[in-house]
Image (cartoon, grey):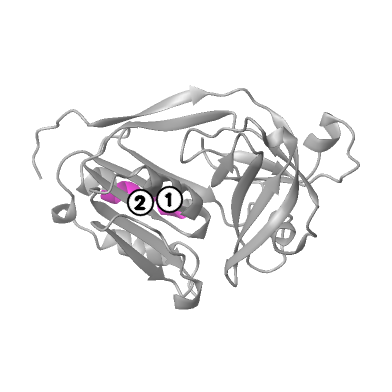
Amino acid sequence: MSSVKSTPSFRLERRPLDLRFRRATLAARTWETPTYVRVRLTGEDLIGFDSPGSDDHMRLFFADADAADLEAVRAAPNREYTPLAWDAAEGWLDVEFAVHGDEGVAAPWAASAPIGASVAVGGPRGSMVLEGRPDAWFLAGDETAVPAIRRFVGLMGDDAVGRVLIETTDAAHELAIAAPVDVTVTQVHRGDAFPGTALAATLGGIGAADRPSGSVFAFVAAEQAIVKPARALLVDRWGLSTDEFVAKGYWKSGEAEYHAPH
């Protein structure tokens, strides 16, 4: 790897957004695997919704249908998710959920709430937008990072090069990523191991010689412990600067209220 640092061909630009709370209803549910579900939310309040950044965070508030005022909605149980797809003109929003057991509030709602159930959407309050064109891409994460990874892949041109790593339990739980032909997608299976450990081991096996040439944009997200092995690869072995990658914990073991860094 050359010691000469060139100017990146892209930048990460932060953009503030007007924070809005929008009421919506559950309109459809599609299971991709036995533990991963996509839901569609609809409602007039979703007209005008926008999420410019692939790694955006919004909050879903699981309020009762009769929650009459904003304070009642904001007091409802809530969790952070990445918007996957939406239509600002028609007023719909797709969100994906990893569902493991019946713990918590969000996953059970996504798995079994009746069609027509109420929900509220807060945000995003700000975006980090990828401007320019990376020479190569490196995207890695567990199930919780798949919506963001899918959105980053959607920014790629047909001639993009790079690598995508997705950690899931096993072959029956693999999540397809529709990447360009020269972007290699690898499914990493953890079996009964703790989430993130198989991905961390895979990152640990990638060396300096595996760094793609040119300006590399990298995104790595999973359980909080993934940050250390991600930085060991991206900073220590690949020599990326902190404005060329995102490495974060999307969730933290034992902390249901953990908020991913924005």
Indicate left or right for 244 with 135 as reference. Answer: right
Image vertical order of residue 136 relative to residue 144, above or below? above
Q: Which residue is mark 2?
A: 139
- Residue that extends furthest to the front in the rendered view of this protein: 90
In the image: residue 191, left or right of residue 257:
left
- The answer to whether residue 102 is above or below residue 118 is below
Number of residues whose C-alpha sits closer than 10 Å to that of mark 2, classed few (under 14), some (14–19) or many (20 or more):
many
Judge whether residue 25 can be spotted in this image.
Answer: yes
| Residue drawn where x is 46% and y is 75% of the image | 170
Instruction: Name the quarter where the N terminus is drawn.
Output: top left
Residue 249 bears which disc, if any? none
In the image: residue 168, left or right of residue 69: left
Region rendered in magenta: 225-233
User: Badges 1 and 2: C-beta atoms under 8 Å apart?
Assistant: yes
Residue 204 percent coordinates (x, y): 29, 60
Name the image quarter holding residue 100: bottom right
Drawn side of residue 208 relative to residue 217, left or right: left
Relative to residue 196, is residue 92 depicted above or below? above
Within the magenta stretch, is there residue 63? no
Tell me where residue 15 appears, x and y as whole percent: 48, 24
Real-space CA distance between mark 1 and mark 2, rounded to the nearest whole angstrom: 7 Å
Reading the image, the residue beneath label 1 is 149
Taking depth in this image into account, of 8 and 209 the one nearest to the observer is 8
SS assignment at label 2: strand
Predominant SS along the magenta part: helix
Residue at horizontal 54 percent and vertical 47 percent from the top: 84
SS at badge 1:
helix
Q: Nearer the viewer, residue 29 or 262?
A: 29
